[in-house]
């Protein structure tokens, strides 16, 4: 379900705002899923009950602020949007599984 949202929400965003270059836009948004590589540093690598936000290094608050600021620059806007969507979805995931938005 969570993974499904990670594909669906970017598709909706691209469909609404980036129709002209939708293939490139969708590719970039998908590429932002690479921030999840930081999960590989954690032990265990995957834990469905763990909250990513505030736990994994690339899901920290400082970097979330950086991701937000990326959306203000045209060239990296899509990357920023993808990362922010990712963080929001991860946070919603925390809320649903643990009842918190972050750890
Ligand atoms: Zn994540």
Image (tube, rainbow, N blue to C red):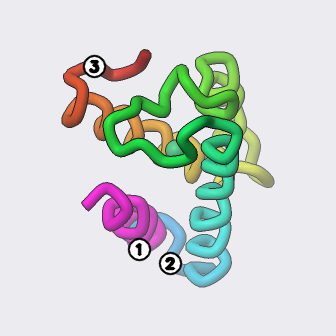
Residue 9 colored magenta?
yes
Q: Percent x, y for residue 8?
A: 35, 68
Quick one: label 2 or label 3, which is nearer the N terminus? 2
Residue situated in front as seen by the camera: 2 or 81: 2
| 55 in magenta | no
- In the picture, the disc for residue 60 is none
Q: Which of the pair 59/14 is nearer the observer?
A: 59
> Closer to the observer: label 3 or label 1?
3
List x then y, in percent, for residue 3: 37, 62
Seen at 58% across and 67% down, the residue is 30
Residue 103 in picture, x, y percent from top left: 43, 16
- Residue named by callout 3: 100
Asked if the residue at tag 3 contacts the one at tag 2, i.e. Cβ–Cβ closer than 8 Å, the answer is: no
Distance from Cα at disc 3 to Cα at disc 1: 31 Å
Quadrant in the picture for residue 65: top right
Q: Which residue is under mark 1?
A: 15
Magenta range is 1-15
Name the residue beneath numbered marker 2.
19
Of pointers 3 and 1, the one earlier in the residue sequence: 1
- Helix, strand or loop for the magenta stretch, by majority: helix
The answer to whether residue 11 is above or below residue 58 is: below
């Amino acid at each position: 379900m969570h993974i499904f949202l990670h594909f669906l929400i970017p598709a909706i965003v691209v469909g609404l705002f980036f129709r002209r270059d939708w293939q490139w836009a969708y590719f970039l948004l998908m590429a932002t899923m690479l921030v999840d590589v930081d999960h590989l540093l954690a032990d265990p690598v995957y834990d469905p009950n763990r909250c990513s936000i505030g736990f994994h290094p690339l899901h920290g608050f400082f970097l979330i602020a950086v991701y937000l600021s990326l959306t203000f620059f045209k060239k990296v806007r899509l990357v920023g949007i993808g990362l922010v969507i990712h963080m929001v979805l991860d946070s919603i995931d925390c809320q649903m599984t643990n009842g918190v938005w972050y750890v």
